[in-house]
Amino acid sequence: MPEKIYLLNADQKPEPLEETPFRDEDMLQQLLAEHLELLDGEQMRPGDPLRWMLVSREMGIDRFSVDHLLVDQDGLPTLVEVKRSTDTRIRREVVGQMLDYAANAAVTWSRESVEAALGPDSDTALRELLDPNRDLEDDDFENASSDFWAKVSNNLTAGSARLVFVADAIPDELVRIVEYLNRHMDVEVLAVELKHFEGKANRMIVPRIIGRLAKPARTPRRSKSQSVDDFLARFDDQQARQAALQLLDTAIEHGATLDGARRLSIRASCRLWKRPVTVSWLTPPGGPGPLQNENHFVFGLFTGRLHQMPKELVARLHVWRELFEGRNAFEPIRDPFNNTRPADFGFVPCYAITYADALDQLDFLKLELGAVLDDLSKL
């Protein structure tokens, strides 16, 4: 039997709304395209809600087209397939179809094709995605936009995407498939049930997210005995200590190794390389670092012999380094340890930022630090 809910009207009288199928699939597709908030990003990522920008409906891929191509605020492409519950393909066939799309996305789409699909109003749509509160000055928005498109390009190259099935009712068969794929694939797979209720004067849509799996908290691994508390105690300046704490919390949340007796290096484990890869280190005031007796954190590439590494790993590390290239407040340094290395070690520039400037860049640093740690852990 159809479900029924009750809406209290202005006179506090309950108006019955009965579960009603959407008239046709296009009606559901159009509704979603105009109101992406129906995907309920808060349910998908509580505390840090996902937001989306619609790139295109019926975005061409290989010889077919995906119903909706979206991109979230983190630059992750989101492929959406929409079906009514009365369409039997929602049970199994649509899953194979979506995996086909995901497999071909990297060879079909590029940053340029995504930008072209957005059309002439792309800047307006991007500002709504990245700066919904209109807090950013034009220069800051340009930096955020550049960072965003770099992440889109990297995700497309790496084949990273989110797969979302949308229907007015999600059958049990699809629930089991989505949960299985989430457990056994690195790709995030979700189903969104949009139940449609209709009455004499009102309509209501109730979203339910299926497939988001809570990840167990990971604890940091350290090869040496220094504790985070001991490290933070060496910061006299409270704001600098808070910046270091937030960066370390981000590193821990994304499974990094924290290593070092005096400085703390932030390292990512990677299956493609025999040793953890250092992407940042934090140095306390007056401690050892690239700029002696100056208060800096450092980000970028902290490994040599790049010519020995797999190309997938090198490509991601260069994307990480290039985020800081030419960005205000980041000072390039050639060899972070200021000493002699073997001729084949091949250091490339990394980037130092003062404690004070790091506070202003903290949101950017936390976002990108988490992204590179996640990506390296998957390689």
Image (tube, grey):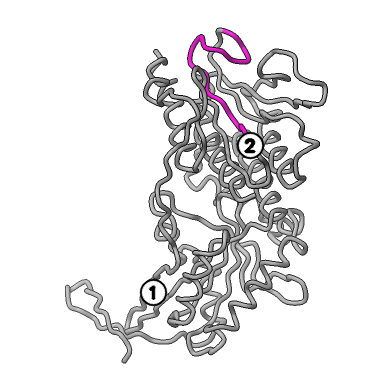
**In this rendering, does residue 111 appear at all?**
yes
Callout 1: few (<14), some (14-19), or many (20+) C-alpha neighbours within 10 Å? some
Query: Which element is circle 2 on?
Result: loop
Callout 2: few (<14), some (14-19), or many (20+) C-alpha neighbours within 10 Å? few
Residue 173 position (above or below residue 222): below
Residue at 50% over, 84% down: 84
Residue 317 position (above or below residue 325): below
Residue 65 percent coordinates (x, y): 70, 74
Task: Return the disc, 2 or 1, that comes first in the chain's sequence.
Answer: 1
Residue 226 percent coordinates (x, y): 43, 23
Residue at 25% over, 83% down: 16
**In this rendering, does residue 239 appear at all?**
no
Q: Which of marks 2 and 1 is in front?
A: 2
Residue 243 percent coordinates (x, y): 45, 26
- What residue did someone put label 2 on? 275
Residue at 40% over, 21% down: 232
Query: Label 2 sits on what residue type?
Result: Arg
How far apart in space, not on screen, are marks 2 and 1 (Cα)?
50 Å
Q: Give the range drawn in magenta.
A: 275-292
Q: Which label belongs to residue 205?
A: 1
Most foreground residue, 77 or 201: 77
Q: Cβ–Cβ below 8 Å for labels 2 and 1?
A: no
The quarter of the picture where residue 300 lies is: top right
Determine whether, in the image, residue 202 is placed left or right of residue 44.
Answer: left
Query: Label 1 sits on what residue type?
Result: Ile
The quarter of the picture where residue 276 lies is: top right
